Amino acid sequence: MPREKKPAPEQKPARKKINLALQGGGAHGAFTWGVLDKLLEDGRFAFDALSGTSAGAMNAVNLAEGQRKGGVQGARDQLAQFWRASSLDGGLAPVQRDVIEGMLNFWNATPFATIVQQAAGMFSPSEMNPLNLNPLRDVLAAQVDFDALRASDGVKLFIAATNVESGKVRVFHRPELTIDMVMASACLPTVFRAVMVDGVPYWDGGFMGNPVLFPFFYETETLDIVLIQINPIERKGAPDTVAGILGRIDEITFNSSLLQEFRAINFVARLIAEGRLAGTNYKSIRLHVIEAQDELNRFGAASRMRSDYDFFVQLRDIGRTAAKKFLDAHYDDVGVRQTFDIQEALV
């Protein structure tokens, strides 16, 4: 009798490739942790490249390090460990907690904080933080083996910082990445002294790219970019507290370069659609956004400087929910069509 043929094993569909753009925004970066955790858990996307600034850089580097050590589950574990260790009630030593609390009080909307903020106009970070202490550096050093990360293959990394001298953005790549480069990306000049990289001073990358998108155009073939947005482009009403005013100034400043890149994407897409760029290397990028602005805006801009773990977990859960909504609504669109209305964002 002829042998009965066994059915061929069911082939899993190939994962869709995307690039991820991770904004900075202090504690609200825990929202991005939640989005990444859900995307990793879902498993239907493959990440080609990550662009990150400030808290986005921290998330990007920890995801890449976790993948290096343990694949998808390693990335999820690494992100969870980083945010736990970064919290005041997490793994910080007492002296580190004191330092972080002192720095965060600078931005909190309390009478004492208002006095300190006013004093910032008279004192530089060198005077207010003479030892240039930043406990997050210790957390990152304990979490990430930069030698191994540089030497390994994996998701591409684009980490942005602002050159203090030239005012231009510098994008650091995975094969060269050091802890100084990541700390430079998250260096708020009102709190910390500039971070030196190869003799050049750098400040927070958000001034010139939050995050940068252009490396995706030139250094990857992937056309779909998913922006995880934590800084609102629009916020109703004018703030009337020192913390609120400073927070909104930061949001406007840190969104300006992103809006310029939106305009460039929109302009190129229009020219391609009109057939005016035929035969060139220009690409029509498909942009998608995962956000939860209604939920995040309720916390106010000053909440970006909170560091209690319960708050991080709350933001993580909001991020996971936002990612699920995006997957349910737009997974089938990825690789086919853009789901973010750039024109509306630019009006």
Image: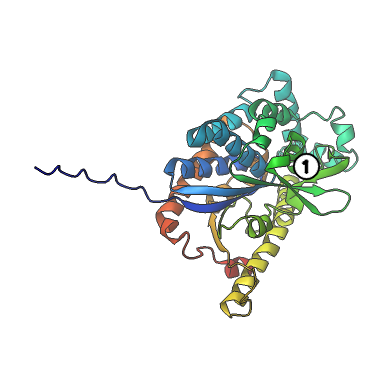
Residue at disc 1, secondary structure: loop
Q: Position of residue 155 (x, y in %)?
A: 59, 44
Q: Report x, y in % for residue 205.
A: 74, 48
Q: Nearer the viewer, residue 33 or 309?
A: 33
Indicate the position of residue 251 as horizontal and vertical percent values.
Answer: 70, 53
Residue at 52% over, 31% down: 70
Nearest the eye: 134 or 147? 147
Please tell me which residue lies in front, 155 or 251.
Answer: 155
Quarter of the figure with residue 191: top right
The quarter of the picture where the C terminus appears is bottom right
State the residue position of label 1: 188
Q: On screen, 155 above or below 88?
A: below
39 horizontally vs 253: left or right: left
The residue under the point 50% across, 63% down is 339
Q: Residue furthest left?
A: 1
Q: Is residue 53 visible?
A: yes
Task: Report the side of 163 relative to 337 (left or right).
Answer: right
Q: Is residue 95 above or below residue 312?
A: above
Query: Given the image, on which type of amino acid does mark 1 rest?
Result: Leu
**In the picture shown, does residue 99 fall above or below 200?**
above
